[in-house]
Each structure stands twice: as structure tokens, then as C-alpha cells.
Image (spheres, rainbow, N blue to C red):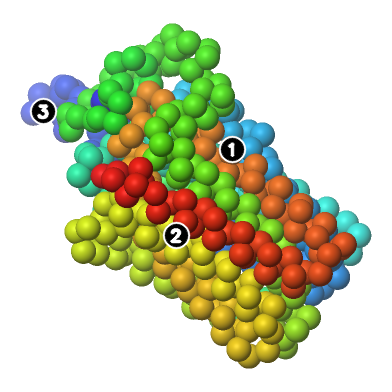
Amino acid sequence: MTAVVEETVPEAAGEGGGRAPERPGPDPAAALRTSLPVANFLSFFAIAAVEFAVPFVAVSTLGASSLVVGALGICRFAPQVLLARTAALLVERYDQRSVMLGSELLRVLAFLLSALALAAGPAWGTAVFCLANVALACGSVLTSVSTQVLVPAVFPDRELPRIYARLGMAESGADGLAPFVTGVGLGLLGVPWTFATAAALALCACALLVRIPRIRVPVGPEASGKGEKTTETIEATESTESTESTEKRSPGRTTLRHGLRLNLATPALRILTFWALAYNFGQCVIEALLLIVLLDQTPLTAVGFGVIRSCVVLFAVAGSGLAERLPARLRTGLGTSVFGCGAVASYSLVGFGAYLGGTAGLVLVLAGFVLDEFCSGVVAVRVQTFRARAIAQEDRAIATASYRAANLTAVPVGFALGGLAGLFLSPVHTLVTVGALMLLPAVLVLSRSVRETG
């Protein structure tokens, strides 16, 4: 499969002043190798700042209930489900630089709306936060699908684990640093300036993305075979070629149903898809309740919660960085099984810690977060690499969109059930029950089908 670079760069004029023939633009791999991780860091830092601040401000300042926290979560993730197919079609039709820039501008809009939320008053503030989360969600689904299509198309197969590790470290590093900085920012700068700073960071990510070539990924039958790619030199061709190949595709191959079938095509893909669904669902039920429980039972402040979140996410950075430095046996499907099991099972510790309460319970919650973040950092690299190799390039956009749609359906459902449980059931007992049930997918991911994947 050959990605298409639309830009060309003219050579210097010859002695006679004539125009020399055009040569292909810069190597996309070289341009993306540095720019994409840095842009990811800035973008995810801004996102993590908002994701930390919005529910905290809603609970601590606006007096939001668990149902409101659940509603905010639904607004953050439900649009990613509803717009998944649209995102896949946009990624296939337009160059990836334009798609990523568009997603960053949607984030800037989200941050500016968040900055104005409190000025709207307590009643309207939550509604503004919801609108900001919707804009943030639209940007997120575009970036995710574009990245999962772009990386395997531009980089050779042997580089995939390293690139995904870099992207994972950038995302985890941003997730780790942002809560602490945001907690301090809320205390020193206030809500509006904290969100305005996040918008400025997203604009910096735009400045980096402008510098990469316009890369369009062909999706027609001439694209790579199932799980295979070549390392041919990326050529400069007319952009209409990829547009025509997109139009020639059967409409049935661009539906979410077809994409879902791709994600269930083999036993390993089926198990990993179910594992991801269970992970997202259980995590969001717990997230809808956990902050309220901790604020109620401990003297937790914005700075303190930010420190906890920052410290534990640093283990995700370590996990992403060590993913390809582990012993050889753990750099295969065995590692996917072991660390996938640890990521899901960690929430049983979180639930039991919330039930236990006090200092000992807080230590268990912290230990559960640490285990989750480290294992997630490793398994994210393994799963992305496996999926890049197992799914053909021509199907990758719709397969990624369907995968996200399925998983992100579990997210708002989890937030909604968690929010309702907080109104009608004991939040603490709900956390314990959900944490215990997450041991089931932890056992399933240890199956032979996953252990024997490459």
C-alpha cells in the first residue's frame, strides 16, 4: 500500500532562470516521527486538563449530583458513537492533515466554551459544560480514526510498536501531568484562565500539524492485503486517485456493521473487543461514583486529587515506554494477555478500597490506579500493533470507527448507570460489585487465542 503525499516542492531555478522539475515533498515518516508525538502531547494535555477540571468544578462549585456527572460523561463520549461512520468517511475522503487540524479547532472551541461556563450561572453552567464536551468528543473521534489509519500507512511494519509506544508515552505523559497542573491552575488562576490556557495549547498543536505534508491514504482494492504492508517509497500523485477509489467501494464496506464484523473476524479480535467493552463500561460506572465518594469520605482538594491522578498516570508513561523493552515472551500475545488482565482486574482493588475507606482504603485505590495505568500503557501498544497487522488498510478506517463506536457506546452507558446507581443505590457497594465483576474479562483475556497472537 502506498500513501499519497499531495504537496510537491519546486527545485531551485537553474542558471538560465528556468523552472526546474518538481520533486516529491518531504518524507511523511520523517515529518510525523517527531511532530505527531509532540502534537499529541499538547493536545492530550489540554484534553486531560478539561476532563479533570469539568467534573471537579461541576461537583465542587456547581453542586452537581452523580446524575449530572454521568450526563457530562455521556456528552463527552456519545457523539463519538453517533459520528463514528461519518468520521471514517471523512478520514478516507480528505487528507489527514486537514482532518487533524479540524479536530484540534473543535477542541479549541470546547476549551473556550468551558472558560465561559461559570459566567453563564449555576443553571446554565452545566449546559455549557455539556456543549463543550460535545465539541471535545467530535474532535476526539476524528483524531483517533485518522491516527489509526495514518500510522500503519506511513510507517513500515517493523516500526509500528515503536511509533505506538511514542504516541502512548505522549498521551500518558500528558494525562499524568495535566491533572496536577490543572489542580494548581484552578487554585491560582481560576476556572476561566485555566480553560483559556488549554485552548492555547490546542492552538500550539495546530501549529505543529500545519508543518506535516498533506497525506491521503488510498482505500481501494489496490491497498494492502490483509494484515500486510509494503515499504515502498511514498509517491506524489494526483489526489483524485484516492477519491475515485473511495467512490468505487461497495457501500456495504463503509457501514459500521461491516466494521464490527471485521473486529469480530477471529477469536483473538473477538476477545480483545469484548475485553475493551468490559473495561470501558466498568471503568465509567466507577468513575461516575468515585469522585463523589472520595470527596465525601476524605478531605480531598483539587490539588490533592490532581497530584494523585498525575502520579498514577506516570506509570502509564512507564508502561508505554517499556512495552517494547520487556522480555521477548511478553512482547507477544502473552504480554497482551497478562497486562490486559492486570488492567481490568485493577478495578477490583479500587472498588474494595472505596468500600474499606480511611487511609488504608485510599492506599488500595491508589494501588489500583497504579496497576491500571501501567498495564494499560503496555497493552495499548500491543493491541494497536496487533490490530494494525490483522486488519487490511482498505478496511482500517471503518474498522477503527466501529471499534470506537462499540467501546464508546459502553462509556455513556456506564456513566448513565453509575449516575443512576448513585441516586438509588449505595455508591460504595456499587463500586465493590462492579470491581468484582471486572474479574471476569480479566480471566477471559488470558485465553489461548490471545496468548498465541504475534
Residue 92: x %, y % from top left: 45, 25
Amino acid beneath label 1: Ala
Element assignment for label 1: helix
> Residue beneath label 1, please?
405
Residue 416: x %, y % from top left: 76, 52
> Residue beneath label 3, please?
14
* Other-residue count near label 1 (Cα within 10 Å), few / some / many at <14 / 14–19 / ≥20: many
Which quarter of the picture shows residue 358?
bottom right
Element assignment for label 2: helix
> Are dots 2 and 1 in contact, CB under 8 Å?
no
Amino acid beneath label 3: Gly
> Residue beneath label 2, please?
341
Question: Quadrant location of the C terminus?
Answer: top left
Above or below, 212 relative to 437 = above
Estimate the spatial distance between the alpha carbons at disc 2 and disc 1, rounded to whole Å: 23 Å
Residue 78: x %, y % from top left: 69, 43
Q: Nearer the viewer, mark 2 or mark 1?
A: 2
Amino acid beneath label 2: Cys
* Other-residue count near label 2 (Cα within 10 Å), few / some / many at <14 / 14–19 / ≥20: many
